[in-house]
Image (cartoon, rainbow, N blue to C red):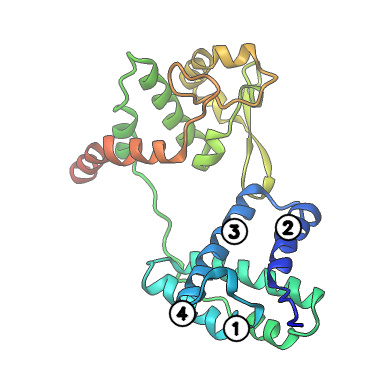
Amino acid sequence: MKPVDPFPRLLHAFFYEWMVQQRNASAHTVRSYRDTWRLFLRFVAQRRRRPIAQLTLRDLTASEVKTFLQYTEQERGDTIGTRNCRLSALRSFFSFVADREPTPIEQCTQILHVPMKKAPIHAPCYLEPEEVKAILAQPDRSTIEGQRDHALFSFLYNTGARIQEALDVCPRAIRFESPTCVRLYGKGRKETAEPSLARNRVVAKIAAHATAEGRRRAHLRQSVWCPARRIGCPLQTGAIRRSGSEDHAEPVHTACNTS
């Protein structure tokens, strides 16, 4: 009788037992690892000319990993940082396999020895005061959406929060009484108390007005940056990128050239 390949069982155990139950990895980490494995398996299946369901653990060699990483950089246009994240997801699995299945230990060791790639360290990019003013001047504050966008852009500027950190802010995270502050839950599940809200009373006032409905239901973890007439439906990062890149790109470009 042909032995059953352990790969499907190991991959399932890696995600559901190791990452979720034992490591308590965040949903973002699980999705990132899932996407890497989806790309990697499709890549190997295409090179081996067989369906993904027929791939075995033996097919996933260090040579395939190196070729896959080269493919992500050269053909997909991934940055070195993204390339290293992909490698971390693959290494983590094969480290797990080495602990569970001693037979393919040599194969796992070869993959674990694939090195991370050093990326150049660039000077930090930042906006000049004129550029910030140009962005903040764009939202039409006579509308609810404009008030929300102005408050959100000001919030990002005053707190230095990542986009997702800002979008995850719920009514219960904001303290409007003195001393005013907002709790941010950031990358790596780190919580910080940011007092910058106190330095911008206009933003605090607009945020309080825009989230009045949410504050009446403060026991719910709803984002304060809801689209108009859609309380409980938070904005997505794509909407912020479109607002910042399309609507405000020309004013920022003009401010850069005239400053």
What residue appears at the point 65 percent right and 26 percent down from the top-left corner? 221
What residue appears at the point 41 percent right and 61 percent down from the top-left corner? 123
Closer to the chain start, of discs 2 and 4, is 2
Residue 20 appears at what percent x and percent y? 74, 53
Give the side of residue 194 with respect to residue 245, left or right. right
Closer to the chain start, of discs 3 and 1, is 3
Quadrant containing the N terminus in the rendered view: bottom right
Residue 257 appears at what percent x and percent y? 19, 45
Closer to the chain start, of discs 1 and 4, is 4
Q: Secondary structure at mark 4?
A: helix
Q: Nearer the viewer, residue 14 or 239?
A: 14
Residue identified by numbered label 2: 19
Quadrant containing the C terminus in the rendered view: top left
Q: Amino acid at mark 1?
A: Thr
Residue 252 appears at what percent x and percent y? 26, 40
Residue 141 appears at what percent x and percent y? 34, 17
Q: Secondary structure at mark 2?
A: helix
Residue identified by numbered label 3: 34
10 Å neighbourhood of mark 1: few (<14), some, or many (≥20)? some
Frontmost of labels 1 and 4 is 4
10 Å neighbourhood of mark 4: few (<14), some, or many (≥20)? few
User: Most extreme residue toward the front, as rendered?
Assistant: 1
Q: Secondary structure at mark 3?
A: helix
Give the side of residue 159 with respect to residue 147, left or right. right
Q: Amino acid at mark 2?
A: Met
Marks 3 and 1 sit apart, C-alpha to C-alpha, by 19 Å
Residue identified by numbered label 1: 61
